[in-house]
Amino acid sequence: MAGLDGVLPQALELYRELHAAPELSGQEEHTAARFAAWLRDAGCEVTEGVGGHGVVGVLRNGEGPLVALRADMDALPIAESTGLPYASTRTATTGDGRSVPVAHACGHDAHVACAAGAASLLGRARDTWSGTFMVIGQPAEETLTGARAMLDDGLFERFGVPDVILAQHVAPLPCGVVAHGPGALTAATTVVEVVIHGRGGHGAAPHLSIDPVLTAAATVQRLQSVVSRENNPFEPLVVTVGALRAGTVPNVIPDRAELGISIRCCSDDQLDRAVAAVERIVRAECAAAGCPRDPDITVGPKAPVNINEPAAAARVHAAHTALLGARRVLSTPPMLAGEDFPFFAHGSTPAVPTVYWFLGCVSAADWRAAPGRSPQEKVQSLPADHAADFAPAAEATLRHGISAAAAAVPALARVEQRQGTEAGHR
């Protein structure tokens, strides 16, 4: 894309800076400030502090549709093991007071850098599109709270309801490849936080205690029966206990155990059924163990299934095919990763059209070296999102991510303008 070489070095510098300085969900102060500063330099009208640390940049370019691009900004409580010269060594304090390592193990730093680069390209190529381009720097995606917080803070009322909202997400596919999909792209998902209450005591006298660790272990095992015995095997469902915290030393039975459970599936109704099953099992295991009080169960926000709007998705698909060639625009099945991006679709009535695609981030050399012949076999051996060693090939990922995002906007603008002109002649 014309002008990309003039934008890429600065975008790469921004990416490395953000990668080395990740911030947890709800703490994205530095990331938001850097993103806002870039967008101002690109010619956007910028508003900060929308729904927390959210950033909105608006680039006006005459009459035409309002096209938005979402970029999530938060990082994960993971210790990075990539060995990169700009690897994160940061720690942060969580809301419950724990000190944790922080890393951009999901590629949100790349999303920000790509959106920043796309804004600069579109600002310099105003003759290729007409309308308004809105960049949404979204906080707290990993906790599934950021999109709703921005909407609750008047995102659409203050800046306009977009005609379409775009988003891309890095994935362990070759650089220069994007993947689109019909139907569900990411899962309906939620997180369930559980506190099991026992009665603490000496490890030498378990009969005088009620061991919450044993109850938690039984609960972890039993929860898998939701998938294997309660769920239709033709409907994908994953129940993952990603956090189990209890005790401090081996010879003391603690008085509580905490579980963090994620649930992912392909329909909103299925998610409700799975949550009800998880709650039932947790309560039953606590009752069976004779726990002195009922468990505390907190169900987090339920993100809807992420589904592309067909007409807008077809236009973006065509734009990416023209940009990259048909062989580099793949079709992807649904993934059970969760996203709060679908909240934007439901933030207005009627629903706002959304288009979401996956962006390859694996270098050509690493892809060739990965064992296996099929893409599915190769992906299994490569570091995936949320892994401590997940490391996109920075320059190639940004080159194609900036281009893919920037190419989608003129395609949508031109189609909308043509339809409006035709309607005016009828």
Image (cartoon, grey):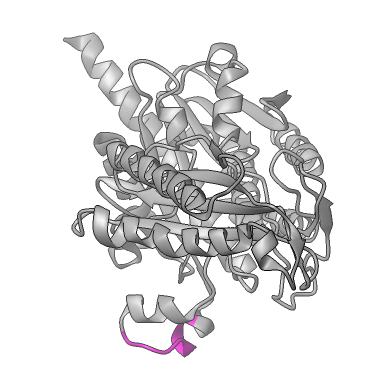
What residue lies at 65% left-to-right and 64% top-to-bottom? 207
Q: In this view, does 51 lie to the left or right of 132?
A: right
Quarter where residue 101 is shown: bottom right
The reply to whether residue 68 is visible in this rendering is yes
Range of the magenta residues?
A: 367-373
- Identity of the residue drawn at 58% across and 42% down: 141
Q: Find out whether residue 105 is within the magenta segment.
A: no
Residue nearer the viewer, 301 or 175: 301
Q: Is residue 404 visible?
A: no
Q: Nearer the viewer, residue 7 or 162?
A: 162
Decide if residue 275 is on the left or right side of residue 145. Answer: left
Where in the figure is residue 388, as x and y percent of width and height?
Answer: 65, 70
Residue 360 point in image, percent of width and height: 47, 64
Relative image position of residue 45 (x, y in whole percent): 69, 23
The image shows a total of numbered marks equal to 0
Q: Is residue 371 magenta?
A: yes
Q: At x 57% / y 52%, what residue is drawn?
A: 260
Residue sitting at 76 percent across and 49 percent down? 23
The quadrant in which the C terminus is found is: top left
Between 289 and 4, the one nearer to me in the picture: 289
